[in-house]
Amino acid sequence: MPISKYLSSLQMTEKIIILDFGSQYTQLIARAVREANVYCEIIPYNKEFSCTPELKGIILSGSPFSVNEEKALTTDVISIAEKLPVLGICYGAQLTAKLFGGKVEKSEKREYGRARLNLLKDDALFKNVAQDSQVWMSHSDTIKALPEGFEILGTTESIPVAAFKRNRENSTALYGLQFHPEVYHSVDGKAIIQNFLVSICGCSQDWTPAHFISDTVADLKNKIGDKRVIMALSGGVDSTVAATLIHQAIGNNLFGIFVDNGVLRKNEFEDVLKLYNQLGLNVKGVDAREHFYTKLAGKTDPEEKRKIIGGCFIEIFDQEAKGLEHIDFLGQGTIYPDVIESVSVHGPSVTIKSHHNVGGLPETMKLSLIEPLRSLFKDEVRKVGVELGLPHDMLFRHPFPGPGLGIRILGEVTEEKVWLLQQADAIFTEGLKKANLYATIWQAGTILLPVKSVGVMGDERTYEFTVVLRAVTSVDGMTADWAHLPYTFLADISNEIINNVKGINRVVYDISSKPPATIEWE
């Protein structure tokens, strides 16, 4: 189903559209809008949309491009601004200024980093924003002259036009900001965005988890009726919350399948099945470990391992599905970042690694997709889960890759290596929880290296594997910094792993950030 049709079916009372010109910060704009309890959608700058009554305003994103390029990305801001309030951010502001007749030129120096906003006039957009508030710049073009009928609202030391608006009576509001209010470094940025949503666009801020649940369950009941849904479950946040929503709509007409692929965390298969039973979900557990180990034997390339794990899962899932009759729908835990990826400015981005949580199931199944979380970010999924009454430990567990420990074991995956890593990973995870560090970490895990090193235990020399401890802090996983865990904690974990997991004699800690590294090693 096209995104527009799916999202419109949710019957939102109000929404904001963000036109994406390819900025790395576009998702941050959406998150800021959502945090203000206003629903929004990101669509490519050149995608058509309808000015329906529930549409309250438009935000134009930044961009890595220049408005003065021969094939500059553009949209009809003039026409849009006649119908709806508009806020242009960085490139969006520059495009607005140029299209209305202003002058945008290459800046004498690249304007990047922190600046101080000097507000020249009182305006609803800057309600509760401090004079000299810190803002974040990231652009190489600058607005040299505003169009006729526009006025400057704010400057910085190096930028004469940092904020502006159209000054015309009896017209919709039109604003431009040369800085990025959506990023963390703009101290009052979220207040500015909220002012635009509430004071300028008139949004009522009624988009809440409870609102989402009631709308979604009603929509699912209407869409599915008395038909049946099959769904692959992983034990993760997304699939569990999605399954719970579908279950609320259709009860035991949801058939869940949870596959033990041999690369799950310690005791995860048993623990997850127990949780699903407690939640009242209709889920079948399938032990397919040997099938996966056989297919993975001798394989060392990371991408090949991902594809094998994904392919084996499809085989098992398809096999189990054939044992069920009269299935019409396939449920999935797809979330909004996956949707954004598929409808980016220039289409799907270059593949860095194979996706593991959307699509890929056999076309021969000929099932219609049900994706109740398709409009939510990860943190919003958790909020919905809290509203549904799901266990805190499950909702706030760290992200775990679809290929599981298979991509945390560098080189060939064997049953012996999986056992080693499961033990070490469990010690690390439980240690974080006992030390009250788990909640401060975005993601943590243990990696088994394909090398052995010499060690000494008592009077004996050992020749055993090395594991890497990996822990990062992040907001959304797009960027991440290595977690500065206490040395004493790391020392204790190292000792516990080496003393209790025979086969590991060395523990190291990964202190690389993303970028340039990734969170996972493969």
Image (cartoon, grey):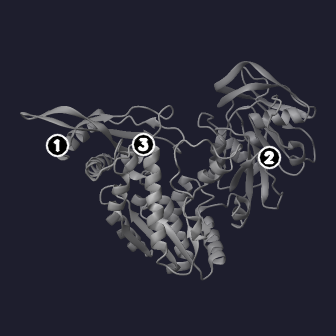
Foreground mark, 2 or 3, reads 3
- The quarter of the displayed image where residue 448 is located: top left
User: Which residue matches tag 3?
Assistant: 301
Q: Earlier in the sequence, mark 2 or mark 1?
A: 2
Query: Can residue 326 be seen here?
Result: yes
Q: Is residue 262 left or right of residue 324?
A: left
Q: Earlier in the sequence, mark 2 or mark 3?
A: 2
Question: Callout 3 environment at 10 Å: few (<14), some (14 to 19), or many (20+)?
Answer: few
What is the quadrant of the N terminus in the image? Answer: bottom right
What is the quadrant of the C terminus in the image? Answer: top left
Reply above or below: 196 against 319.
Answer: above
- The quarter of the displayed image where residue 294 is located: bottom left
Seen from the viewer's position, the closer of residues 262 and 264 is: 262
2 and 3 marks in contact (CB < 8 Å): no
Q: CA distance from mark 2 to mark 1?
A: 59 Å
Seen from the viewer's position, the closer of residues 218 and 259 is: 259
Seen from the viewer's position, the closer of residues 242 and 259 is: 259
Question: Callout 2 environment at 10 Å: few (<14), some (14 to 19), or many (20+)?
Answer: some
Seen from the viewer's position, the closer of residues 321 and 178 is: 321
- The quarter of the displayed image where residue 492 is located: top left
Q: CA distance from mark 1 to mark 3?
A: 31 Å
User: Which residue matches tag 1?
Assistant: 499
- Residue 46, label in figure: 2
Q: CA distance from mark 2 to mark 3?
A: 39 Å
Q: Amino acid at mark 1?
A: Asn
